[in-house]
Image: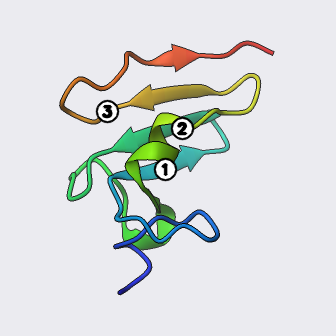
Amino acid sequence: MDRTSVCARPGCQAPAAAWLTYAYTTRQVWLDDPGSLSAPAAGDRWALCAPHASRLTVPAGWSQVDRRTGGAPAPQALVP
C-alpha cells in the first residue's frame, strides 16, 4: 500500500476516507473527499481514515472547512 491509501496517523492502518490540507498563511484546514479535485497534489495533503477525520480539531485561531460530501458537518471556526 502507498502512503495515500491508508490513514497518516501513526499506528493507524485504516483506509483513507478524507484528505487533510492546510494553509499556514490563512490559518485554514480543509477536509476533502478522496479523489476530490479540490485537494492539492499528494505532497501537500495527508490521508485520514473516517474516525480520525471526524475527530479532527484545529489549533485555536484556525478555521476548519469540511468539503466532503454525504452529510459532512458545516464549517466551523475556532477563536483563540
Q: Which mark is residue 77?
A: none
Q: Is residue 31 above or below residue 49?
A: above
Q: Is mark 2 on a helix, strand or loop?
A: strand
Residue 52: percent from the left, percent from the top? 51, 47
Position of residue 11 in the picture relative to residue 79 (left or right): left
Q: What residue type is labelled 1?
A: Thr
Question: Compared to 2, does 17 lie above or below?
Answer: above
Residue sitting farthest toward the bottom: 1
Q: In this view, does 59 lie to the left or right of 4?
A: right
| Residue position marked by numbered label 3 in the rendering | 67
In what quadrant of the picture does the N terminus appear? bottom left
In which quadrant of the rendered view does residue 75 lie? top left
Sequence order check, earlier mark of 3 and 2? 2
Marks 3/1 in contact by CB < 8 Å: the verdict is no
Q: Residue lying farthest right?
A: 80
Mark 1 crowdedness (10 Å alpha carbons): few <14, some 14-19, many ≥20: many
Query: Which three-letter amino acid code belongs to the residue tagged 2?
Result: Val
- Mark 2 highlights which residue? 29
**Frontmost residue, 5 versus 41:** 5
Residue at figure coordinates x 41%, y 65% from the top left: 14
Give the alpha-carbon distance from disc 3 to disc 2, as whole Å: 10 Å
In which quadrant is the C terminus drawn? top right
For disc 3, the neighbor class at 10 Å (few under 14, some 14 to 19, many from 20) is many
Q: Are marks 2 and 1 in contact (CB under 8 Å)?
A: yes
- Return the residue at label 1: 21
| Nearer to the camera, 23 or 19 | 19
> Which comes before the other along the chain, label 2 or label 1?
1
Q: Earlier in the sequence, mark 3 or mark 1?
A: 1
**C-beta proximity under 8 Å, tags 3 and 2:** no
12 versus 60 height, above or below:
below
Q: Which amino acid does label 3 sit on?
A: Arg
